[in-house]
Amino acid sequence: MTFAIPRAGPQGAESAGPAGVADVLEVPARAGRALLRRRGLRTGPVAYDPVRERVLLLVPSGSAEELPGLLEWLEWGGVELELTARSAYDPREAAALWLRPPESGCEPGAPVPGVDLVRLVGAAATECHRARLGIRPSQPLAFS
């Protein structure tokens, strides 16, 4: 999944190309930083919202609808996580800072080769849970 970088249009208006929207997974900043440090985990564009202290992982359109069922399937259902998803997120709507900027000239909502939504959601749920429990990213789990 890749996205067009917003660019100035007529009279300073921003334009992100034809669609400019995608779904977004939102995680607390601490969990997001730990998620981005994971080796071998591919993500699409990632932004940080400093006002809400949330990391925003842009995912293909339609992914937000899949989150509840996916969390249940991954056996995270019923666990209190600060992992949420929103549909039709427009990266221009917030004063977000790009941690991993989108590639220019690419179609919004299109899948990025190598990004696995199931693996991304599983890793995000794990890091949200670890952050909630206060486990440091370098601290191994009890069964490791």
Image: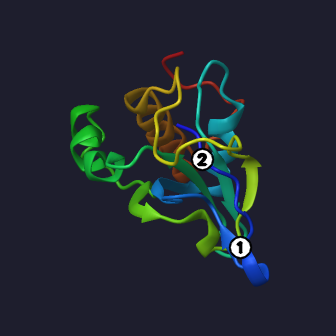
Q: Residue furthest bottom?
A: 11
Amino acid on which the number 1 mark rests in the picture:
Ala
Q: Return the residue nearer the eye: 62 or 123.
A: 62
| Residue 2, position as x, y percentages in the image | 58, 40
Q: Is residue 61 above or below residue 43?
A: below
Residue holding disc 1: 95
The residue tagged with tag 2: helix, strand or loop? Answer: loop
Q: Is residue 128 above or below residue 115?
A: below
| Residue 34, position as x, y percentages in the image | 67, 39
Q: Is residue 129 above or below residue 23?
A: above
The residue tagged with tag 1: helix, strand or loop? Answer: loop
- What is the crowding at mark 2: few (fewer than 14 residues within 10 Å), some, or many (at least 20)? many
- What is the crowding at mark 1: few (fewer than 14 residues within 10 Å), some, or many (at least 20)? few
**Looking at the image, is mark 1 or mark 2 nearer the viewer?**
2
Does residue 69 appear left or right of residue 83 in this picture? left
Residue holding disc 2: 3
| Residue 131, position as x, y percentages in the image | 58, 49
Amino acid on which the number 2 mark rests in the picture:
Phe
| Residue 47, position as x, y percentages in the image | 67, 55
Q: Residue at x 41, y 63 (%)?
A: 88
Q: Return the residue nearer the eye: 53 or 66.
A: 66
Q: Which mark is residue 41?
A: none
The answer to which of marks 1 and 2 sits earlier in the sequence is 2
Q: Residue at x 41, y 54 (%)?
A: 81
Q: Is residue 10 above or below residue 50?
A: below
Q: Residue at x 58, y 55 (%)?
A: 56
Does residue 127 appear left or right of residue 86 in this picture? right
